[in-house]
Amino acid sequence: MRRSLLAIPFVCFAASFAAAQEEGEDLTSKWGHSRHGAAYDEGPRRRPWIMEGIGESHFPVTSSHPEVQQWFDQGHTLLHSFWYFEAERSFRWCLKLDPDCAMAYWGLARAVQDPERSRTFLEEALARKEGLTPRELAYLKTWQAKQAIAEAEGGRGTADEKREARRKATHEFVVSFDKLLMDHTDDIEAKSLYWLEVPDILDGPEAAGLVRYGMEAVLQQVLAKDPDHVGALHYRIHNWDGKEGRYGIESCLKLSEVAPESGHLQHMPGHVLSGIGLWHEAAIAMDSATRVEKRYMHDEMILPEDNWDYVHNLDYLCYIQEQLGLYEAALTGAKQLLLAPPSIESSPFGDFQKGPIVRAMLKFEKWDDLLSGELIDWGQGPMEQLLRHYAEARAHLGLKDLDRAEASFESLREALAMLREGPPGGGGEEADPDPMQAYWMNRMKRITELYELEIEALLSLAKGESLEGIELLTKAAQQQEEVWMNDPPQSAYFLYNVLGEAYLELGSLKLAAAAFEKTLETVFHDGFALSGLVRCYSALGEMEKAGRAMTALDIVWSDADPSNRWLEAARATGIEPSGESPFEIDQRSFQKTVLDVQGHSLWTPPIAPELSALDSLNRPVTLSRFEGKNVLLIFYLGDECLHCMEQINKANELVETFRALDTEIVAISKDSTAEIADYEKSGKFEITLLSDPGFENARRFHSYDDFEDIELHSTILIDTQGRVHWAKTGGEPFMNFDYLEKEARRLHEGVISKITATGGD
């Protein structure tokens, strides 16, 4: 009989593990890690399923198993939609069926986003190239050349030497791809991937921009052969993303029909259509994207944190709804983002989930709601605090409280000074931060410096210092135009609109009109600018221009909330719509389009699978035993697993902490009921231990690797309604109990319920 879990020193586990290794026993997979190496520990661990509605593509591969082609095609099609996580799942199943399928490894090399994992998989593909067709070999050779670019960038030498090495490697890659196209002229997959791979590695945006027209010709060749080719349609939309998006309208509408069950392939049409001001069609596409993602997450027990597309889609939808004058709808979507657990990886800048709700409140001047703090629980990160002080300064200015606006402005400046110093512990400007962190820091600095300039300008105007205020606001508008991104924008205002309203208030109608027209050069068919133009041109007596602006405004804000003051002000002029519609196509009404067939409009956590295990007395245990309580469910690998015991012992120490938050801790493993009874005899265990010897529960809760038939570590927080509030599964046990305590506290204190009660669910 085994000794108590708590009584066994950790050194014993380490010693037994080392002894087993000396005897040649492979214990790697026994602890939840892949026997094939670290590259296989990341990504999906469950088998794939046939996915409908994602479009189609076909890439013939050599394999000893007849079923591999089906799964390879699915993975390849998913890559065409940038659905990397699910593509990896399909390719890994190919290897389950045929471990020597070289092209499945090539698929994995393309699917994973980690450079080291990608290199590992490509090496595995190259090691199995014997017996491949000349076409398959050409692809492997081309991707080997692409890998050389990454190696040149990370190699040794001076900056000039690395730049030259990269130039040579890039040349060889492009030449290799060109030869692939020449040798296989009918290969539409090569032509599609040519667009995806080649412009991305060229130096500078100018070079990439120059190839846009040539790439259009390549993609047209694909579509001439297969008009529904999911990759070509997708890439063509990306090709024309921006102010020339009108060239991609046809592909946008077609792609939505070809791949209705792919979140990103619904998203990209919305991205492009919003960029050219087709706001209703953009909203239909983006709302479809969010519904597809919500259904996918609900069905597969995947949470927002692990599904980047969903968060981006919903943020974008909120922005488009704002542009349609639909504040209440945008607010509901923004609250949805607050419902989801925050990211585990804390950002030095704070929690970005608050961005959309702040943007909506600012844009529609909900000053009292913003200042009340009822929905916004501000964190202490420098970026988050900076956003807070900016928003509060804006609100105080809107309420004409100059003293408080001045105080918030000083706090804004202090927060900006902290941000300029770098993230906490970052060592200041001379530190060498993580590249992604550095990217966000530089981007946030540019945006937040505009916050400072904007508030300074508005304070000057509020004090009657008109010339200084206009000069500062003009400068801010010019700088903002240079960095504006429709992805969606993080700023609530396009500052030329703010400048236009300032000129209107000063009675400078022509300058106001010029500012509003300037907005429309970047934010096509912007309702706020159109309202300004109706008012300006009406007052100037330019009725034809006012009528044309009213025509566009009537279409953009045809479904706007009735409390929209900008629409009311435009209608108060008495101007009627006149002239032809300025839009490239006749749009459907977003509010009148039925999208329920795509899925629910609101996200709710997925329902937890059935829990049916035995306790130490052989009594069946289900979630109903813990009715009215949250459950912290831990799947561990048994008492012989050292790092499992670290997690279980830590959980046991925190039992009372979690019980105070109405949360019971339950740990489940393959250990028999007799073994867990032995553990409990020590009298030191407060957590509930359960037995799952056949891994039925582990499979239901996705804590099992179907590719290698091994159990995994999982930590799952289930709320009182039996829904999976948060989950983490992988080769290592989750040890961040501070995070788990914070989420249990959010549930206990009713933070989620408060958001839900105000329209978030």
Image: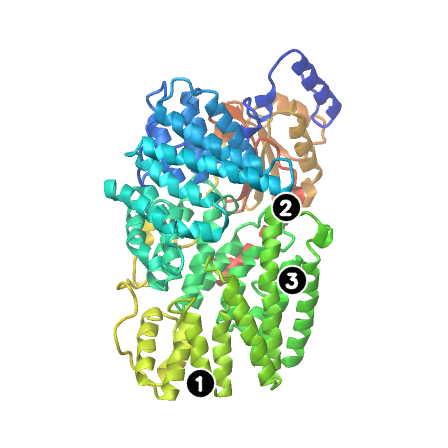
Q: Is residue 362 depicted above or below 572 in this figure?
A: above
Label 2 crowd bin: few (<14), some (14–19), many (20+), radius 10 Å: few
Question: Going 43% across and 76% down the picture, which residue do you hit?
Answer: 516
Q: Is residue 163 depicted above or below 361 in this figure?
A: above
Which residue is disc 3 drawn over? 385
Answer with left or right where residue 580 lies relative to residue 740. Answer: left
Instruction: Say if mark 3 contacts mark 2, CB within 8 Å.
Output: no
Q: Quadrant of the N terminus?
A: top right
The mark found on residue 434 in the picture is 2
Answer with left or right where residue 446 lies relative to residue 195. Answer: right
Which secondary structure lies at badge 2?
loop
Picture coordinates of residue 93, whole percent (x, y): 42, 27
Answer with left or right where residue 501 lies relative to residue 432. Answer: left
Answer with left or right where residue 388 lies relative to residue 363. Answer: right
Picture coordinates of residue 326, whole percent (x, y): 41, 67
Residue type beneath disc 2 = Asp
Residue type beneath disc 3 = Gln
The Cα atoms of the two marked residues, 1 and 3, are separated by 37 Å
Residue 700 seen in the figure: no
Which residue is disc 1 drawn over? 509
Residue type beneath disc 1 = Leu
Picture coordinates of residue 50, whole percent (x, y): 34, 34
Which secondary structure lies at badge 3?
helix
Instruction: Say if mark 1 contacts mark 3, CB within 8 Å.
Output: no
Q: Nearer the viewer, mark 1 or mark 3?
A: 1
The Cα atoms of the two marked residues, 2 and 1, are separated by 48 Å
Instruction: Say if mark 2 contacts mark 1, CB within 8 Å.
Output: no
Question: Going 48% across and 20% down the picture, which residue do you hit?
Answer: 127
